[in-house]
Image (cartoon, grey):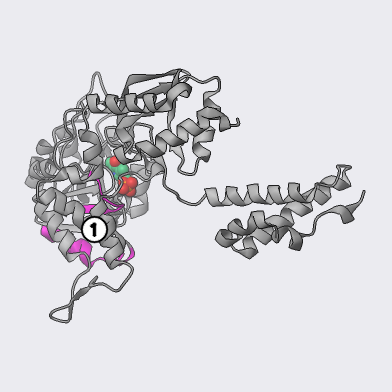
Amino acid sequence: MELSKLPQVGRVLEAPELSELEARLGKKALGAIAREIVANARAQMQKGAPAPTFSEVVERVAVRGRERLRTQVTRVINATGVLLHTNLGRAPLPEASLDRIRDAAGRYSTLELDAELGTRTRRALAVEASLAELTGAPDALLVNNNAAGVFFVLACLASGRDVIVSRGELVEIGGGFRIPEVLARSGARLVEVGTTNRTTVEDYARAIDERTACLLRVHPSNFKITGFSHRPTLSSLGRLAKDRGIPLIKDLGGGLIGDLGEHVKGEEPTVGACLRAGANLVCFSLDKLFGGPQGGAIVGDKALVDRLRDDPLARALRIDKLVILALEPVLEAYLTGKPERIPIHALLRASVTELEGRAEAWRAGLGAVGEGARVVRTQGAIGGGTLAEEPVASAGLAISVPDPDALMRALGRAETPVIARIAEGEVVFDARTVFPDEDPILLATLRRILEGEFEP
Ligand SMILES: *Cc1c(COP(=O)(O)O)cnc(C)c1O
């Protein structure tokens, strides 16, 4: 065993092949990787393995370094057909939002200042006013995300008291957000009514007593109860809540404002409809169907929103300035009747014929390597827990390859990774979620891979 043949860490780090990685990861992190690789090699040699060559060690360090970089958040092309993919960052932002962030976030801003009067203003004043205007709510409050919003409402309005929820709505939204657990953590006591499949207004009515803080209605989001089932309408709950003088809280999830267009079949209540039905507060995500940055909106009765604003938790959950900047153009798009400026709505509006045309162009652009490819009708999805099961009519390209998993991995390793899906043994690229200006990158990537560069 000739341990002296092992390359020295210092020399490995000087290899020109590693200079770019060093520039991105820093000398310290790359040095730690190199020491670990050399230590591993030494351990292997002690078990009788031959000494790795200098370039083998450099290559191993480079591979590990690139793995580290891969865990950073980078842009991808979403060819899954799922519009709101929590793993892919949910709603993409409008160009105007990026401009606002570029313009104002790199410098100082009037985040909490009236520049003309020189007085302090409330953070998010303008976006909260716009949101109230847009939804028809008397007032609005913004927090970090909808999970925070629901928790906040319960902690502020119901801690130490009872919250009445139907057994059919004690759901888990995903990512560990379970209604009974959130409720328990807020300090409120859960009072379950009805059954899993059937709950009536009378069930709620019977459960109300002097300890009741509110009724909570939860959008089941990602699952459905069908068959012998009943859920009271929101307006019948609204009437009950009003009669008894207790607030009705609605966790809506998605935050739909207008309509979803002709390509989505499912029914989804809008924020405005929930308020008109009598919900005193409606909580929803800003980065689901609303189409904006991550955030949570709480809209409704002024007195309740004021109580939230005065609560010490408000400061702990307050919204970030980047979110406010990104949100302004989204609200503007809705308020000026131009929702198609919001990417999620632009993507939803494309006709299936248009998508088929693009998929056909992808196929043609692949040339000889695209021989096994065919244009297919597909079913995309809204995703993100909202209308998750409802199909979105779409089209794309299906490619037959001997090893679909290997193709998926190669796509994932590309400089701009392409995320597709496997259906019935074929790799399917859904055009619904690929922005038209991404077509050239998608095509070049796919072509390069199919032309033989892809190693399993
Ligand atoms: C998505 C969702 C949540 C959680 O919202 P986030 O913005 O992800 O925190 C809560 N409730 C419902 C009904 C949802 O659909």
Q: Nearer the viewer, residue 224 or 36?
A: 36
Q: Residue furthest front?
A: 367
Q: Quadrant of ligand 1?
A: top left
The residue sitting at 68% across, 51% down in the picture is 61
Would residue 231 appear left or right of 220 to someone viewing this image? left
Numbered disc total: 1
Q: Which residue is mark 1?
A: 142
Residue 296 location (% of width, % of height): 27, 52
Where is the C terminus found, in terms of image quarters? top right
Q: Residue 303 colored magenta?
A: yes
Q: Residue furthest bottom?
A: 118
The residue sitting at 51% across, 21% down in the picture is 401
Q: Give the magenta-colored segment's residue range.
A: 290-316
Looking at the rendered structure, the secondary structure element under dot 1 is strand
Residue 280 location (% of width, % of height): 13, 50
The residue sitting at 8% across, 46% down in the picture is 242
Q: Nearer the viewer, residue 448 or 4?
A: 448
